[in-house]
């Protein structure tokens, strides 16, 4: 009777717990196809591993803007939430009102929340320094919506690198993929636009492309190969994330991060948030990145000798 009365009054028993036991990883529906987006499967593995180490009960919840998030969370009886990837402002507003520890991960940063993200700006800087060192100067950036924190930070690293190197930045080489279409198709379309722009304006093609993630870089590379361009002799490519497909032919230069460490760090930050009495503070944690040079950006000795 007590439980039923509490339910009718809108109480959630999870709010009465003083110790975190059930922790939920909240994913937007666009990130749940691990075959297409293997990045998040590694994050999930690190998240689950950290929960086991701390004797927490993990669960995964997927949501979109039309879902009744409050109802789903009651069913999960969760004590804390780690949000992985981009979500809409409406869902973020609901999380703010939950009165539970919340941590944003990977592609989100918002005032009043603690977050753990990839060092995206540093990744952009490393990419550009690598390409500058190879003599590349007309470097295009293929990006997605800047509403995504990760993409906006990678774009900032791209632009800032030109400034710090004292080089001219051509804004026409920065293109944004079209929304509401398949990501691979959108990246291929962005590359086609760059090629068409060069031909229409009688300007040189980009000599390198930095794409906001590996899948976009691979799609753009396929377009260039179909146009008869040589990789990397005519145009170099660098992606971001180091997904398994980056090892394809030619292997893709990419920025990598310890994906499982992101999941583990999210759990650690949740526990710290639960113990803190100052939850309103914005605290940002960045996980370091590394550049992995591969054939797509630099001619190897074998290629040179042929």
Image (cartoon, grey):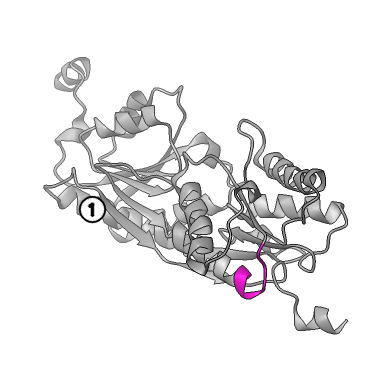
64 falls in the magenta region: no
For the question of whether residue 208 can be seen, the reply is yes
The quarter holding residue 139 reads bottom right
Asked if 190 appears above or below 65 in the picture, the reply is below
Residue plotted at (22% across, 34% down)? 14
Q: Can you say which quadrant of the picture contains the N terminus?
A: top left
For residue 98, above or below residue 285: above
Q: Position of residue 27 (x, y in %)?
A: 45, 40
Corner quadrant of residue 85: top left
Q: Is residue 27 left or right of residue 294?
A: left
Tell me how many marks there are. Answer: 1
Residue nearest the observer in this picture, 22 or 293: 293
Q: On the rendered structure, is 199 left or right of 7? A: right
Would residue 181 appear left or right of 234 to someone viewing this image? left
Q: Is any atom of residue 50 visible in this view?
A: no
Residue 261 in picture, x, y percent from top left: 41, 62
Helix or strand or loop: what does disc 1 sit on?
Answer: helix
Closest to the observer, 157 or 111 = 157
**Residue 79 coordinates in the image, percent (x, y):** 25, 40
What's the magenta region? 131-137
The percent coordinates of residue 273 (x first, y second) are 21, 50
Which residue is at a point 71% across and 54% down the rendered structure image?
Answer: 218
- Residue assigned mark 1: 271
Label 1, residues with CA under 10 Å away: few <14, some 14-19, many ≥20? some
Quadrant position of residue 264: bottom left
């Amino acid at each position: 009777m007590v439980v039923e009365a509490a339910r009718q009054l809108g109480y959630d028993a999870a709010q009465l717990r003083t110790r975190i036991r059930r922790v939920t990883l909240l994913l937007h529906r666009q990130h749940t196809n691990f075959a297409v987006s293997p990045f998040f499967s590694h994050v999930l593995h690190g998240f689950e591993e950290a929960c086991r180490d701390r004797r927490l009960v993990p669960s995964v919840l997927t949501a979109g803007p039309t879902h009744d998030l409050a109802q789903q969370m009651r069913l999960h009886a969760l004590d804390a939430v780690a949000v992985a990837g981009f979500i809409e402002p409406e869902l973020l507003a609901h999380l703010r009102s939950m009165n539970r520890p919340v941590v944003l991960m990977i592609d989100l940063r918002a005032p009043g929340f603690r977050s753990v993200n990839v060092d995206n700006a540093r990744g952009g800087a490393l990419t550009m320094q690598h390409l500058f060192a190879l003599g590349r100067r007309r470097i295009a950036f293929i990006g997605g919506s800047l509403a995504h924190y990760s993409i906006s930070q990678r774009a900032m690293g791209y632009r800032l690198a030109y400034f710090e190197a004292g080089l001219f930045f051509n804004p026409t080489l920065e293109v944004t993929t079209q929304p509401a279409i398949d990501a691979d198709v959108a990246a291929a379309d962005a590359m086609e636009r760059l090629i068409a722009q060069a031909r229409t304006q009688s300007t040189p093609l980009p000599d390198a492309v930095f794409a906001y993630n590996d899948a976009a870089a691979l799609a753009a590379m396929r377009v260039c190969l179909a146009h008869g361009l040589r990789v990397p002799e005519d145009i170099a490519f660098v992606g971001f994330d180091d997904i398994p497909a980056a090892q394809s032919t030619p292997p893709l230069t990419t920025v990598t991060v310890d994906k499982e460490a992101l999941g583990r760090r999210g759990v650690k930050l949740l526990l710290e948030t639960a113990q803190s009495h100052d939850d309103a503070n914005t605290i940002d944690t960045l996980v370091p990145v590394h550049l992995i040079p591969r054939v797509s950006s630099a001619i190897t000795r074998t290629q040179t000798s042929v």
